[in-house]
Amino acid sequence: MASVEPYPSPPASPKAPDVDPVLRNALRYTISAKEYKTLHEYLIIRSKALRDRAPPPARVSSILTTSDDHHAATIRASLRVFIASQTAAGASLAGFALGVYPSDQLRLTIAIYVATRAAEFTYNALENEGWFGNKPRWWGSWMLMPLATGQLLHAFVFDRECFPKTAFEELGLLVWQAYGDFILSHTPNYLQRRPQSYPAALPWPDPSTIVDSLAEMSRLHWPPFTSPILFPSNPNPLPSSLVAVSPITSPAHPSIPHLSCALLHPSSPSCSKTLLTYTLTAFPSLAKFFTLIFALLSLPRYKAFFSNPSKELNGLSKRVLRMTIFIMMAIGTSWASICLFANAFPRNFLSTQRWFVGGFLGGLWAFLDRQTGRSNFLYSVRLSIDSAWKVGKKRRWWSAVKGGDLAVFVMALGVVNAVYEKDPAAVQGGLLRKGLGILRGEGWTDRAEKEGKETFNDKSKDI
């Protein structure tokens, strides 16, 4: 009697079942079809709880078998080398697991995050060794903010498709308001909304159209304002490419000299008064927003509030006030700088680059939050790097290298592990240090705490 094979092989060219691509890649980089068959034969089939739930080897084989099995085998081998190794070089090989996720944007975001964290931890380690003992008191991570805000504002005006969205939007979890929407929603007085009495049948430019028109004014070298009120016989008071903002500029105050000012604050000829009005209008809404955010972030420390409520409330109030003034003045200064440059510079001087200068000036307000705002500064830097990379690709300053994000991630992960190996206290965050301990096979342990080393969180330092 012929023996029947307990696990018949699948057809030569089976039709792959519909499986989520993320799950398929995760399975391919974890186990091969042959390994699953052996596991099923010697373990799964012997367990009553698993036998009825686990898929048969034929189905798993149809899912895992593809044309690039050698690539998947390479990734599996690197992951297993990492698991078996206790060194920084071995740990960095885990970075190849990033190739599991099919989204280019998420891989880029993760690579930028790990690279900036690696640079941050390297700086911490060097500072622990005394490299920056004579730095001035004003030195800190806040100095990165002007560069980041300058680049972001320039990209927001000229390359909005390269402007960052929220980091979680790629996952379908829109937790935080998009970066650009936050700016627009907290820019009263400068972006004119449709008046309630304006006829609904007539068009009104939305905020995006207003920003696009400002970009066009930059390309036209900031044309002057010709008031239709003073010159009603002029058939073309606006350039043809700016007629969309005519509902705002046509009734603007006749004494306004610059078209940009007529668009940003049409009812007031005073640029300084507009900035003052903006601060009085924006402060309450921003204060409410940050009070809610910081109150939620303080919930894990509720015991400290009960033990010393006056001290905790005072600290919370100071943090809300600093952040509110910083963000309010950063946004306000960036917009007001357009009026400043229109009055101070010749029309052809830095006609498009002045947006970067305006954002740079706005970012200088980060000095107010220099003691506690490092995470916010570095977050903005990561957004700026992401945006600058996309702008460069769009304008063909550079081109993407296949697998480049994966290479950056692997190298950065190696740096993080090397720093952790030499000076675990330089890796900021107890949870992150414990996570590295798990990845390195050391268990859920904080080496910095175990060795009694003072961490950057304990020192309350800024870089």
Image: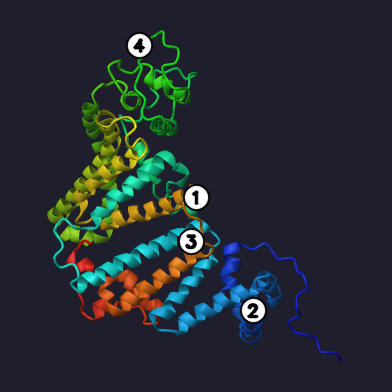
What residue is pinned by disc 2?
51
- Of all residues, the one furthest to the bottom in this rendering is 1
Q: Quadrant of the C terminus?
A: bottom left
Find the distance from the CA under tag 2 to the CA under tag 1. Answer: 55 Å
What residue is pinned by disc 4?
229
Residue name at image x 38 percent, y 22 percent? 248
Secondary structure category for the residue under label 1: loop
What amino acid type should be assigned to the residue bearing mark 1? Answer: Arg
Find the distance from the CA under tag 4 to the CA under tag 2. Answer: 84 Å
With respect to residue 407, does 174 lie above or below? above
Secondary structure category for the residue under label 4: loop
Of the image marks 4 and 2, the number of the one nearer the N terminus = 2
Secondary structure category for the residue under label 2: helix
With respect to residue 148, does 347 lie above or below? above
Secondary structure category for the residue under label 3: helix
Find the distance from the CA under tag 4 to the CA under tag 1. Answer: 45 Å
What amino acid type should be assigned to the residue bearing mark 3? Answer: Arg
Q: Which mark is residue 369?
A: none
On screen, residue 159 versus residue 374, left or right, reads: right
The answer to the question of whether label 4 and label 2 lie on touching residues, with beta carbons closer than 8 A, is no
What amino acid type should be assigned to the residue bearing mark 4? Answer: Ile
Residue name at image x 26 percent, y 51 percent? 294
Residue name at image x 24 percent, y 53 percent? 143
Residue 1 appears in which quarter of the rendering? bottom right
Q: Is residue 30 visible?
A: no
Residue 135 appears in which quarter of the rendering? bottom left
Q: Say few, some or many: other residues with alpha carbon within 10 Å of mark 3 (under 14 / 14 to 19 / 20 or more).
A: many
Q: Which mark is residue 107?
A: 3
Find the distance from the CA under tag 2 to the CA under tag 3. Answer: 36 Å
Q: Nearer the viewer, mark 4 or mark 1?
A: 1
What residue is pinned by disc 1?
396
Q: Nearer the viewer, mark 1 or mark 3?
A: 1
